[in-house]
Image: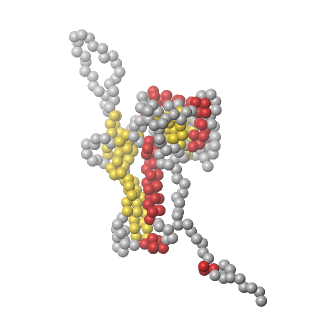
Amino acid sequence: MADTYTQVSTLSTLVTTAYDKMIENANRSKVLFRGAVDKYLADPTHAGSTYTLQIYNDLAETSAALTEIAEPDAVAPPANDTVNVAFAEWGRLVVRSFKLDQTSLAQVDPMILDQLARDQAVSLDNEIKTIANAGTNVFYGGNAVSTVTVDAADVIDSDDIRAIRTFLVRKSADTVVGDLYHALVHPNQSYDLRRESAAGGWQDLHKYAAPDVFWPGVIGVYEGVFFQETPRVKVANDGAASATNYRAIFRGRQALAEVVWKEPGTVIAEPGVVDKLSRHRAFGWHGALNWAIYRQNNLVRLETGSSIANT
């Protein structure tokens, strides 16, 4: 009689798929735009639904020479410039069931909290990015003269950087770190800039020579600007014939302002808050804060194409 083998099909209920209980997060880009904010509410009169930030302007430049006996004519200071920042709330909510908590192969609560922390950072970053991209000072790469004329050939180059730095200096924009302005550029823009090989290009002159710059994603210092590389730069298919348009942000000090009513943070509801039997647990994040462009002349957007695909 032939042997009968005890195999998987014989005791199939004993052979199951095993899982690693350590669940890793997906790839995550660094959130950098909130780090580009450096003007804050300093001395409010009282709590308000809107805060008005002000900038006083200098007297008109003219001769201040005096004569020996004549009194000078009095002059009036110019009106202040104002920037309004209105109250805004942000947040996200996740409710976890009792059954999921009791039957899951891995702990769910730490995963939810990490997801919420990431969501908070990304949500705020996106709001600031939207405001930064609403600036009125725009440069275009290559031969482009508007958003709808940008194509793949209109790549970033060294002359774009020199022109933007010249604009910021001409507008008397203070630098951000030492004598350096700050740029947030897409990796595809970084690629095109760093591969430039002509005389006067990045490869010819670039030096990573800013020991006091420790910001994440900094790839170097060039032409008076320190560069942070991030895929979070705004990208849209709104160039010529729907070409991909990359929007780098350049800034001097106090380009963006932030007002905080409540610093965003994690919220964990006590058991019983969500339902009477305490079977559901609520997790979330909540904050009240908003942003605005504070010094328009200290903020520049550079729209370019790229020689490589955004994939």
- Left-right relation of 107 to 59: right
* 209 up-or-down from 71: above or below: below
Give whichever of 66, 30 is nearer the camera: 30
Q: Quadrant of residue 14?
A: bottom right
Residue 109 makes an appearance in the image? yes
Residue 145 makes an appearance in the image? no
Give whichever of 141, 37 is nearer the camera: 37
The single residue placed furthest to the top in the displayed view is: 68
* 15 up-or-down from 143: above or below: below
Residue visible at 60% across and 80% down?
13
User: x, y (%) of residue 269?
Assistant: 36, 64
Give whichever of 233, 50 is nearer the camera: 233
User: x, y (%) of residue 32?
Assistant: 47, 45
User: x, y (%) of residue 305?
Assistant: 59, 40
Residue visible at 44% across and 42% down?
36
* 267 up-or-down from 102: above or below: above
Residue visible at 45% across and 31% down?
179
* 24 up-or-down from 14: above or below: above
User: x, y (%) of residue 260?
Assistant: 34, 48
